[in-house]
Each structure stands twice: as structure tokens, then as C-alpha cells.
Amino acid sequence: MTHPTDATDASLETASTREEYEVKRQDLPLSCPTPQQKLWNSHPRVYLPIEETGTAVCPYCSARYRLVD
């Protein structure tokens, strides 16, 4: 079974490639790795609560996410 983010698309990043990612409300619920990141070589998908504080940190890769709208 494959996932859409398992493609070898070179435009997809690996989770935690950058230190901080901006997230919009339309992208919620927030997960790491996000749908725009490669899943196959990352950690297990984890959903992060960002709605209340506007920020979240992934417990696996320490990627930081910031809600921008």
C-alpha cells in the first residue's frame, strides 16, 4: 500500500528540512510530516495541536510549526 506522499517527486521535502514551517487554518488538522513532505523516509505521522497556542513542535523531529492566519 502506498501513500500519495511516497512518490519520488523531487519537489517534496523531508520532515524537518527547515527549522520552522508556516501553517494556514485551511491546512488543519496539522500532522508531521505534512502532506507536502515525504512520508516514506520520515518518522510515523503524528497529529499536532496548534489551534490554541498558534505553535507546535513535533516530538519526533523537533520541526516547529507556526499558524499564520
Image (tube, rainbow, N blue to C red):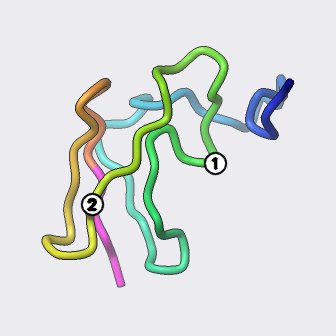
**Crowd tier of the residue under label 2, counting other residues whose Cα lies within 10 Å: few below 14, some 14–19, many 20 or above:** some
Decide which of tag 2 and tag 1 comes sooner along the chain: 1
Q: Amino acid at mark 2?
A: Pro
Q: Amino acid at mark 1?
A: Pro
Which label belongs to residue 49? Answer: 2
Residue 28 vertical position relative to residue 56 in the rendered view, above or below: below
Instruction: Based on the picture, tell me whether residue 67 belongs to the magenta stretch.
Output: yes
In percent of the image, x 20 and y 61: which residue is there? 55
Q: Secondary structure at mark 2?
A: loop
Instruction: Based on the picture, tell me whether residue 48 belongs to the magenta stretch.
Output: no
In percent of the image, x 39 and y 30: which residue is there? 16
Between the C-alphas of marks 2 and 1, the distance is 16 Å
In the rendered structure, which segment of residues is drawn in magenta? 65-69
Residue bearing the label numbered 1: 35
Judge by depth and name the residue closer to the eye, 47 or 32: 47
Percent position of residue 11, x then y: 74, 37
Q: Secondary structure at mark 1?
A: loop
Taking the view exactly as shown, the residue that stands out farthest to the front is 1
In percent of the image, x 52 and y 20: which residue is there? 42
Q: Quadrant of the C terminus?
A: bottom left
Q: What secondary structure predominates along the stretch shown in magenta?
A: strand
Q: Is residue 62 left or right of residue 24?
A: left
